[in-house]
Amino acid sequence: MSEESGYSGHVEPRGPAINRTVDVDGVSVQVRKFSVGWMDNNVYLLADPATGEGLLIDAADDAERILEEVGDTRLRGIVTTHGHRDHWRALDAVAEATDAPVWLHGDDADMVPWTADRAAEHGTRIGFGQAEVRLLHTPGHTPGSVCLLLGDTHLFSGDTLFPGGPGRTTNQEEFQTIMRSIEERLFTLPDETWVYPGHGDDTTLGAERPHLPAWRARGW
């Protein structure tokens, strides 16, 4: 995948964060990406530099590292993309330290030993500073998986979509569900939409779209 303004989307496990600034409807938003934990989980900090407010996506592990990256940013929320343990191991410590409300879809509530403050329902908008994200419910990997859309072309996909295909499913019903989520709620977005996944490198919808038939053919 080609780099955009020097940003490749690649981070090393437990290595330094990478940053880019994107324009969203006239608002500059800083996207910070870094990897934590033994499963190489990506954590994303979105921040509006003009106001100092931000949003954290997946307090996956290593609360000390996450809080160091957050720094003086005033978190307006922590969104957990789904209920698998590798995506919330640091949630309690980060939420307590920052006093930020936690968002989680109700269908995954029984997977997380932390009572969410807000329901991450489809279409919900979460603001930070002058910017906001919109939540997309994308079941399949888990019943309550969500993605976050910043503007029209920046998609934080959790474990729903990766370079090379959908996230892991364990049976045909889950596979059909995640494929419907991808086709009906993600691939309605433009080809230039940048995809920031829950693990590994970034991609774009344009790079992945031609492979949809092959994904369906290979099944779960």
Image: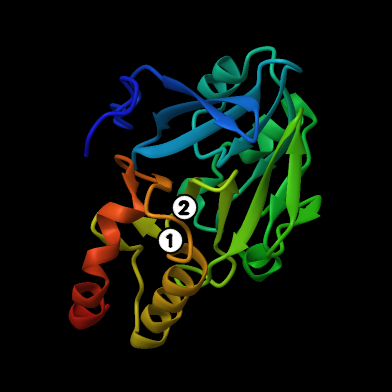
Location of residue 141 in the rendering, given as x and y in whole percent from the top left corner: 44, 68
Name the quadrant containing residue 112: bottom right
Question: Is residue 28 visible to us here?
Answer: yes
- Location of residue 107 by image quarter: bottom right
What residue is rendered at 78% in x and 41% in y? 101
* Residue kind at label 2, given as amino acid type: Ser
Q: Distance between the residues labelled 2 and 1?
A: 6 Å
**Tag 2 and tag 1, C-beta contact below 8 Å:** yes
Q: Residue 160 carries which label?
A: 1
In percent of the image, x 37 and y 54: which residue is there?
Answer: 191
Q: In this view, does 113 lie to the left or right of 166?
A: right
Q: Decide: few, some or many residues near mark 1? Use Cα within 10 Å; few <14, some 14-19, many ≥20.
A: many
Q: Can the viewer see residue 197?
A: no
Is 98 positioned to the left or the right of 27 in the image?
A: right
What residue is drawn where x is 69% and y is 12%?
Answer: 72
Point 50% across, 57% down: residue: 84
- Residue 18 rendering spot, x and y as whole percentages: 40, 21
Relative depth, front residue between 34 and 53: 53
